[in-house]
Image: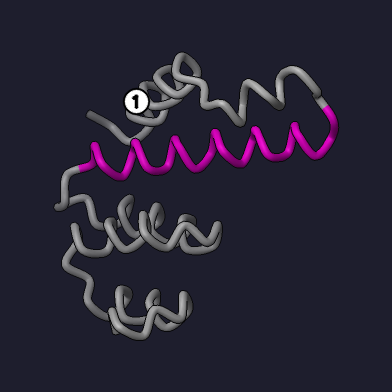
């Protein structure tokens, strides 16, 4: 399955399953709520795509790990780097997250 198709599938699944935060934001749509909803949706899609990708697809997994790190989703980024077996990126991630026990 191509990465583009995985993004479409993950997006459809995330649209169906709404979290309580998203439901609250839907009731009071402010500009901050809209930004929060977009961010939550993006994170959910990245996690879904990363979990569905084969570990041999290192380029796509690397991008997912990078964006999850930028979004400060360190636990999910760690999961991606462990799946890839990329120890160097994993150590850098734990240093950024200041999780010294994991380093």
Residue at the image position 75 percent from the left and 34 percent from the top: 33
Placement of 6 over or under 39, stated as above or below: above
Residue at the image position 68 percent from the left and 39 percent from the top: 36
Which of the pair 102/65 is nearer the observer? 102
- The residue pinned by badge 1 equals 5
Placement of 94 over or under 19, stated as above or below: below
Left or right: residue 30 versus residue 41 is right
The image shows residue 37 at horizontal and vertical percentages of 65, 33
Left or right: residue 40 versus residue 90 is right
State which quarter of the image contains the N terminus: top left
Left or right: residue 35 versus residue 91 is right
Is residue 4 rendered magenta in the image? no
Residue at the image position 32 percent from the left and 75 percent from the top: 89
The image shows residue 84 at horizontal and vertical percentages of 19, 61
Residue pushed farthest top?
A: 16
- Magenta-drawn segment: 30-53
């Amino acid at each position: 399955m191509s990465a583009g198709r995985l993004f479409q599938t993950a997006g459809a699944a995330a649209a169906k399953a709404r979290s309580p935060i998203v439901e609250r934001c839907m009731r009071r749509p402010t500009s901050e709520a809209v930004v929060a909803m977009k961010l939550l949706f993006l994170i959910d899609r990245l996690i879904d795509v990363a979990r569905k990708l084969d570990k041999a697809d290192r380029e796509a997994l690397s991008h997912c790990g990078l964006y999850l790190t930028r979004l400060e989703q360190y636990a999910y980024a760690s999961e991606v780097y462990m799946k890839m077996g990329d120890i160097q990126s994993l150590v850098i991630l734990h240093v950024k997250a200041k999780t010294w026990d994991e380093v």
